Image (cartoon, rainbow, N blue to C red):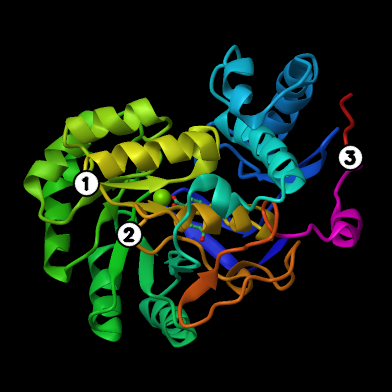
C-alpha cells in the first residue's frame, strides 16, 4: 500500500507498506490481524518474507496441531520458536479477534481499557530541508495532533528540533533516533535538553542497555526505549537499571497484546509511563493499538495517527482524527471489518492456506 508521503528514518526511506495479513478460521468464527514486520529487516531482524515463512512452516502448524486453543495458550505453544515476535503477535491477535468477536467482547474490554478515546501523536520523518519539515509539521498541528515526534539521526537533530520547537511553541515534542547514535554522541545529545522534549527514543543499538544507562545519567530529557524492549522481562530489567524512564509499547515487537498488557501492568506498578508505538499499521492493526492505548497507564500520546496520515485508502473504515484524538472501537473483537474486496484487489500474491 503506497504511503501518502515517503517516510524517512535513520535506517532508510519507506514509500509503501508491504502488509502481511493473517486470517484464522476457527469453530468460533474468523479473526484477522496484521503483522507489523517491514518489507526489509531494517527496524528489527524480522521482515515480511521471514514472518510469512515462520507462520507457514512453524507457528500455524504448531497451533493447528494443538487442538482447542485460546489466545492465552499461544505464547506457550509457540515458545519453541526463538524470536519472530511480530509473526507470533499476528497469529495470537487473529485468534484473539476470533474469540473476542465470538464472545461479543471488544478488544478494549478484553484489555481492560478505561478510555473511550485516545490522544494521538504523529511521527514525522527526516525531511530534505528544514522548510519542508516545517511545512509538514504545520499541517499536522493544524490537523490537531497532540504531540509531534521527529525522527533524528547524526546531522539531522539540533537544527530541525530547534526549528520545530520555534514553530509549535509548547506542544509536546519528542525525538526518535532508531539506534543511530553511539556512546561518543552523549555530549552532543545533551544539547537536546534545551528544547524541553518529552523524551528521546532509542538513541543506541537495541542490545546496548549500558549506554542508555550512561545517557540517562548525563541528560535531563527522559530516555525511552523502543527496539530494546522485546518482552516484559527486558522492560523490567531496563527500568531497574535506570536505562529507561518511559516505555514505548509495540505489540508486534513484544510478541502480542497479551505480553503488552503485562508490560503495561509492570510499568504501572513502577510508576513508569507508557505510550503506544506504531509501525505504519493499516486500520487492522491500528484498531488493536487504539484499544491498547486506552489503558490507564498509557499517559502519553501514541504513534496512533489517523488513517490519512498513512494511506489514501485504508483496509478498514478510516480512523479519523477528532480534536487530536481517535475513538476506541467498541464493536466485538478489533471492532473493525477488513475490506476484503480491497485486500483481494491489492494482494501481491494469493493467500497461503495452512490447514
Ligand atoms: O505508525 O505512525 C507510525 C510510525 C511510528 O515512527 C514510528 N515508528 O521506531 O517508532 C519507531 C518507528 C518504527 C517504524 S519506522 C518505518
Ligand atoms: Mg521508535
Which tag, 3 or 1, sits closer to the chain's start? 1
Query: Residue 256, image x and y in percent?
Result: 55, 36
Looking at the rendering, the stretch of residues picked out in magenta corresponds to: 336-350
How packed mark 2 is, by other alpha carbons closer than 10 Å (few <14, some 14-19, many 20 or more), is: some
In the displayed structure, does residue 178 sit left or right of residue 342? left
In the image, residue 347 lies in the stretch drawn in magenta = yes
In the image, residue 183 lies in the stretch drawn in magenta = no
**With respect to residue 64, does 290 lie above or below?**
below
Q: Which residue is mark 3?
A: 351
Query: What's the distance in space between the residues labelled 3 and 2, CA to CA?
Result: 39 Å
Going 58% across and 17% down the picture, which residue do you hit? Answer: 76
For this orientation, the residue located farthest to the bottom is 142
Going 23% across and 42% down the picture, which residue do you hit? Answer: 244
**With respect to residue 216, does 68 lie above or below?**
above
Q: Which residue is mark 2?
A: 299
Disc number at residue 190? none
Placement of the N terminus among the 4 image quadrants: bottom right
Q: Which residue is mark 1?
A: 271
Query: What's the distance in space between the residues labelled 3 and 1, CA to CA?
Result: 44 Å
Query: Residue 125, image x and y in percent?
Result: 46, 64
Which tag, 1 or 2, sits closer to the chain's start? 1
Give the quadrant of residue 157.
bottom left
| Residue 203 seen by the camera | no
SS state under label 2: loop
Give the quadrant of residue 58.
top right
Query: Residue 149, image x and y in percent?
Result: 37, 65
Amino acid at each position: 500500500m503506497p504511503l501518502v508521503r515517503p517516510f524517512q528514518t535513520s535506517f532508510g526511506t519507506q514509500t509503501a507498506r508491504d502488509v502481511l495479513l493473517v486470517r484464522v478460521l476457527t469453530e468460533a468464527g474468523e479473526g484477522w490481524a496484521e503483522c507489523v514486520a517491514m518489507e526489509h529487516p531494517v527496524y528489527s531482524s524480522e521482515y515480511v518474507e521471514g514472518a510469512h515463512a515462520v507462520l507457514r512452516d512453524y507457528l500455524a502448524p504448531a497451533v493447528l496441531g494443538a487442538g482447542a486453543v485460546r489466545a492465552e495458550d499461544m505464547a506457550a505453544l509457540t515458545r519453541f520458536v526463538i524470536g519472530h515476535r511480530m509473526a507470533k503477535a499476528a497469529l495470537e491477535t487473529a485468534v484473539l479477534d476470533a474469540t473476542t468477536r465470538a464472545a461479543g467482547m471488544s478488544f478494549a474490554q478484553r484489555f481492560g481499557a478505561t478510555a473511550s478515546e485516545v490522544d494521538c501523536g504523529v511521527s514525522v520523518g527526516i525531511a530534505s530541508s528544514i522548510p519542508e519539515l516545517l511545512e509538514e509539521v504545520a499541517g499536522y498541528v493544524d490537523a490537531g495532533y497532540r504531540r509531534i515526534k521527529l525522527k533524528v539521526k547524526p546531522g539531522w537533530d539540533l537544527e530541525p528540533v530547534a526549528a520545530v520547537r520555534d514553530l509549535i511553541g509548547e506542544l509536546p515534542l519528542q525525538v526518535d533516533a532508531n539506534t543511530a547514535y553511539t556512546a561518543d554522541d552523549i555530549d552532543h545529545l545533551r544539547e537536546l535538553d534545551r528544547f524541553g522534549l518529552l523524551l528521546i527514543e532509542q538513541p543506541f543499538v537495541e542490545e546496548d542497555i549500558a549506554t542508555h544507562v550512561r545517557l540517562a545519567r548525563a541528560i535531563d530529557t527522559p530516555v525511552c526505549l523502543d527496539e530494546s524492549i522485546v518482552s516484559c522481562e527486558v522492560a523490567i530489567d531496563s527500568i531497574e537499571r535506570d536505562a529507561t524512564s518511559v516505555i514505548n509499547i509495540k505489540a508486534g515487537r513484544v510478541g502480542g497484546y497479551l505480553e503488552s498488557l503485562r508490560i503495561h501492568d509492570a510499568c504501572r506498578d513502577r510508576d513508569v509511563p507508557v505510550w503506544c508505538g506504531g509501525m505504519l499499521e493499516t486500520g487492522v492493526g491500528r484498531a488493536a493499538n487504539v484499544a491498547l492505548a486506552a489503558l490507564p497507564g498509557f499517559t502519553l500520546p501514541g504513534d496512533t495517527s489517523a488513517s490519512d496520515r498513512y494511506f489514501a485508502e485504508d483496509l478498514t473504515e478510516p480512523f479519523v482524527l477528532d480534536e487530536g484524538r481517535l475513538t476506541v472501537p467498541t464493536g466485538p473483537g478489533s471492532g473493525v471489518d477488513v475490506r476484503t474486496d480491497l485486500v483481494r484487489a491489492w494482494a501481491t500474491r494469493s493467500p497461503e492456506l495452512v490447514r
